[in-house]
Image (spheres, rainbow, N blue to C red):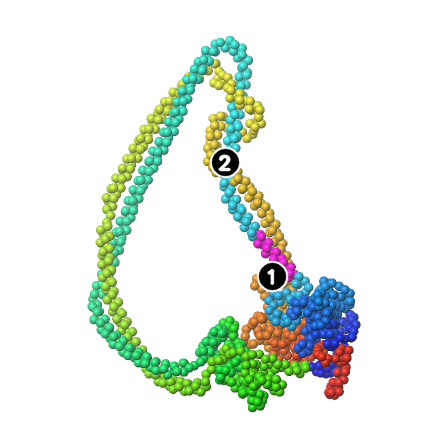
Amino acid sequence: LTAEWTGREMDLPQKRNRISHEFTSCQPSTREAAPSSSTKGQAGGFVEGAILRISMHNFLTYDHSEVFPGPKLNMIVGANGTGKSSIVCAICLGLAGKTAVLGRGDKVGLYVKRGCSKGSVEIELYRASGNLIITREIQKENNQSTWMLNKKHASQRAVEEAVKELHIQVGNLCQFLPQEKVGEFAKMSNIELLEATEKSVGPPEMYEFHCELKTYCSKESKLENVCKEKANFLEKARQSNERNKLDMDRYYTKTKHLDRIQMLEKKKPLVEYETARKELEGVKKEREEMKRKLKSLKEAQEPLLRKIRSVESQLQPIEHQMKELTADIKGASQKCKQKHDQLELRNKEVDDIRQDLSLKQTEEADRQKRIGHTQLMIKDLQKELQHMGSMGDVTPQIEDVNAELKNIQDEKAKLEGESLDLRRDKDEASGELHRNDMMKMKEDKLRVRFRDTYTALKWLRDNRDRFKGNVYDPMMLVINVRDARHAKYVESQIPANDLRAFVFQRQEDMEKFMTEVRDTQRLRVNSVIAPAESCSKRPPSRPLETLKRYGFFSYLRELFDAPEEVMSYLCHQYRVNDVPVGTEKTKSMIEMVIRELQLRVIYTAEEKYNVKKSNYSNNVVSSNSALRPSQFLTTTIDADERHQLEEQLRAAERKVQRCDQRMAAVREQLTKLDRHDNELRAKKKKLSELKGKKRQLEQKISTKQDSLRQMEQNEINLQAIEEETNTKIAAVNNKKVAIMEEYLSHMQGVYTKLDQIKTNLLAKCKTLMSRASAICKMSPGETAVPDELHRVSSVCLRHPSSFIQPAFSQFPDTLDEIDAMLNEEKTRAECFTGLSDTVVEEYNRRELEIKNMEKELDDKTNALRTYRQNIAEAKERWLNPLKQLVDQINKRFGDFFRSMQCVGEVDLHWENKEEYDKYGIRIRVKFHSSAPLHELTPHHQSGGERSVSTMLYLMALQELNRCPFRVVDEINQGMDPVNERRVFNIVARTACGVNTSQYFFITPKLLQNLQYAEQMTILCVHNGPYMLPPNKWSEKAFIRRLRFVQPSLTE
C-alpha cells in the first residue's frame, strides 16, 4: 500500500509540496514540532478549527509521534494493533473529550503507555486569528490532567470553551465516531439522531431553539395541568357554594324576619310612648284647669273612684270567661278537623270501590276476547286435521323403508370391514420403516432446544412449493454422521447457529423465507445460501496418506453424509474437506504436527487445536480446547440398513397401491349406498313428520278446547258486581251525611253560644265605660298616666336615637297592626330551623376562595397564553429551517443510495406534532429490490448494511457540516467488497469537494484499484520492534529506492 501511494505521488507532480506523513516508533524521538502559523492553514485549504498537527508522547502504543493531516480526506491505514485508533483517542482526549466517548477505559490514566508515569497529547488547530495549540499532560497515578493553551497553563473549562467556539463536538456521533461506538450509531433513537444532527450541521441557534421549545412545551404542559386542576377545583367550589346558597338564602330570610321582629319590638314601645305622650300633652294643657277643679271635686270623686274599682273587679271574671271560651273554640276547631279527615277517608273508600268495579269490567272484556280467539284457532286446527285424515295411514310405508335401510346397513358394514382389512395391510407394510426411522428423534431435539426453528420447519414443509430452488431443513436434521463417536468433531467445527440454519440454493428463496418467518411471524431463525459453484467435491490440500504417519485417520468431510448444497456450503465456509481428524498418537506428537504440517485446524481424539501465524514476527501461535460431547448429531442411521428398509418400503408401497385401488372401488360402492341410504332416510323422515304432525294437531285441539271450557266457566257476573258496588257506595255516603250533620249541629251550637256571649260582653263593657266616662267627665284612657307609660317614657328619654329611626316608617303606626305583624313574623321565623351562623361563614369563606382562585386562574391562563405564543414563535424559528435541513440531507442521502442501486430516505418523524421532545430523524433503507423500505435499527439490517447506511448518512452531512472535521474509525469492517468500493468512491468524491471540511477515515485495509483524488492524504501507520526511529524516516529515500526498483515509474 505504501508503494502504491508513493507511486501515485510521483505521477502527480502538480500536488502540493508538503507530504503528509506520520512518524511512529517505540523509541523516543528528538524531532521538534513543525512551526505553526495562520498562513499555513489558509494556503492548505484548512477550515476554521481543522487539525494541523497531532503530537503524542508516551500515549497508548506510541513513544513519540507527530501526525500532519491534510485539509480534506485523510485515510489512516495500517494493520490491526499498530495504533490507528490511538490517533482517534488522541484527538478525543486532546480536545477535552470524555473517556466514555471512546468506549475503552473509563479512567484517563489508562491511556498512558504501559511502563510510563505520564503522557501527553498536543493538537494544533487552524484559526484565522492565529492557530490554537492545546496541550494535555496526563498523570497516570492520580488520573489528573494538566492543560495548556498556546503553551500557557489553562483550566479544562477554558479549553472546553475554546473548542466549543470552533464548533468541535467530540461527543457527537455525527462528528466523531470511534471504533467502539460504530455499532451504537444504529442504536441511536430517532430523537438522539436529531439532536446530534442539529448540533453537527444545523445553525448554532437551531439546537438552542429546539431546547427552548422543549422547555416551553414542558412548562406549558405543567401550566396547562395546573390550569385544569384549578378550573376543576373552582368548578367544584362553585357547585358546592351553589348547593349552600339555598341554606344561606334561608338563613338570611330568617335573619330578615328576626330583624323585623326586633324592629317591631322596638317600635311598639315607641308607639305606646307616642300615644301616651300625645295624651300627656293634652292632660298637661288641662291640668292647670283641672287643678282648680280638683280640689273642689276631690271629695266628690271619692265615691266615684270606689265605684270604678268595683267595675274593674267585675271585669276580671268576664276576662276569665273569655279565656275559657277561647279554649272551647280551639277544641271545636280540632273536632271539625277530625270530621273533615273522616269525610276524606270515606271519599277514598268510594274511589277504591269504583276502581275495583272498573277492573272487573276490563277483566270480563279480555275473557270474552280470548274466548273468541280460541274458538277461531280450534276451527282452523280441525280443518287442518280433516285435510290430513284424508291422506291415509303412513305406518306401513315407514316399515318398508326401515327394512330397506337395514339391508343397506348390512352391506355397508361388510364393505367397511373389507376396507379395514386393506388399511391394516397397508399400515403393516410401512410400519417397519417408520419404527426404524431416526428423523423423529432429531426433530424432537430441535423442538425442545430451538422452538422458533421447529415452527419455521413446519411452515416450510407446508409451503415448500412456494420456492423455486432446493430448500433444505436445518443442517442438524440433514447431516448424518456415519459413526456416533465422530459427531463431536462435526459439532465442534460447525457452530450451533449454522447447525440450526436452513440452507437455500437461491438468494430470492432465502429472502422470501426470511421475510415470512422473521418479519411476519417474528421467529428467530438462521439461514444460509450455498455457493453458486459447488465445493462439495473439492479435494484436500494434501492426500490423507501423507498424514497417516501422524495418527490422522480421516478428513472431517468423510465422517458424515449431507445433501450436495449443504456439503458445498460446509466445504466453502468451514473447510471440512481440509480439516484432518487424528487419534491419541496425534496428540502425543502434536508439536511436530503443528511445526511440520502448518495446518490451521487439527483434531485429536479429545481436543481441537487452532494454529495461527503472526503477520509481524512469523511466529506460530496455537491454542487448544477440549471437545464437548455431541448434543445434536449423535442419532445416526446405518446406510446399508437404511437401503434395505427402503427396498422393503418400495415393495410395501406397491402393495399399498393395490390396496388403495381396491379401497377406491369399495369407497365408490359405499358412496352409492350412502346416497341411497340418505334418500330412504329423507323419505322416512318425511313420513314420520307427517305422522307426528297429525298427533300434534289432535293434542293442540284438545288443549284449546280445555282452555275454552275453563274460560267459559270463569264468567264474571258484572250486574251483580255493579249492584254490590252501588250498595257499598250508598252505605259510605250515609256515613258521610251522618258526619256532616253531627259537624253542623255541633258548630251551630258553638257559634250561637259564642255570639250571645260576645254580645253580652260588649254591651256590658260599653255600659261600664260609659258610666266611668260620665263619672270622670273624660274620654276613655285619660284618667291617669299608668306606670307602664312612665317606664316607657323613661326608656325613650334615655335612648331616643335607638327608637326614632327612618326604618320605623315601613312598619304600622298602630299597636294592633304591630301586634298582628309581630305574630306573623315570629311564625315565619320559627319555620326556619337547623340554621346557624356557620352556614354564612362557610359560604363567605368559600366565596373569598373562589375569587382568589379566579384571580389565580386568570393569571395562570395569561401565563399559559404567553407560553403558547412563545411556543408558536420558537416553532417558527426552529421547525422551518429544520425541515429545509432534513430535505437537504434526504436529497444527498437518496442520491448516494441511488448510485449504489439501492434506496434510502431521511425524514423528520413525529407521533404528535405538539410533542417537540419526541421529534426525531428517521433513516429508512432498502438494499434489495424485492424488499420494502425498513427503518435503520440494530436488529433488522445486517452489520454491513448498517455500516453502509451510517457512512452514507455521515457523507450526506459532510457538505452541510459546520464542524471543522469529522472522524470515522473502521466503519468498513462489515461491508462486502462491492459496497466497500462504492462507499469509498462516495467518501472520496464528497470529502474532497470544494466546500467540505476535514475528514479522517481510519481503516485496517483497502481494496485494490480504488480511485484516489488529489486532495486525499494517506497516512500509513506502522509499528513494531524493527521500525526506524522518527529522525531516520525519509520519504525521499523511499521514493529513490522505488525508482531504482521500478524504473518505469520515472517515465
> Which secondary structure lies at badge 2?
helix
- Where residue 846 sits: x, y (%)? 55, 44
Secondary structure predominantly adopted by residues drawn in magenta: helix
Image position of 511 (left or right of 996)? left
| Vertical placement of residue 1008 versus 284, above or below | below
Tell me the tag on residue 254.
Answer: 2
| Vertical placement of residue 375 versus 23, above or below | above
Find out whether residue 223 is within the magenta segment: yes
Question: Residue at 40% across / 20% down in the picture?
Answer: 317
Find out whether residue 930 is within the magenta segment: no
| Vertical placement of residue 376 versus 589, above or below | above
Looking at the rendered image, the quarter that the N terminus falls into is bottom right
Amino acid tagged 1: Tyr
Question: Residue at 46% across / 15% down in the picture?
Answer: 773
- Where residue 763 sits: x, y (%)? 40, 19
- Where residue 726 sits: x, y (%)? 26, 40
Is residue 504 in view? no
Question: Residue at 23% across / 74% down in the picture?
Answer: 403
Give the residue at mark 1: 916
State the image quarter where residue 423 is shown. bottom left
* Label 1: few (<14), some (14–19) or many (≥20) C-alpha neighbours in 10 Å: many
Q: CA distance from mark 1 to mark 2?
A: 60 Å
* Residue 178 or residue 72, whichever sits in front: 178
Amino acid tagged 2: Lys
Question: Residue at 56% across / 83% down in the picture?
Answer: 603
Q: Which of the two discs, 1 and 2, labels the residue nearer the N terminus?
A: 2
Q: Which residues are magenta?
A: 209-227
Is residue 1023 in view? yes
Image position of 523 (left or right of 32)? left
- Where residue 138 sits: x, y (%)? 72, 68
Looking at the rendered image, the quarter that the C terminus falls into is bottom right
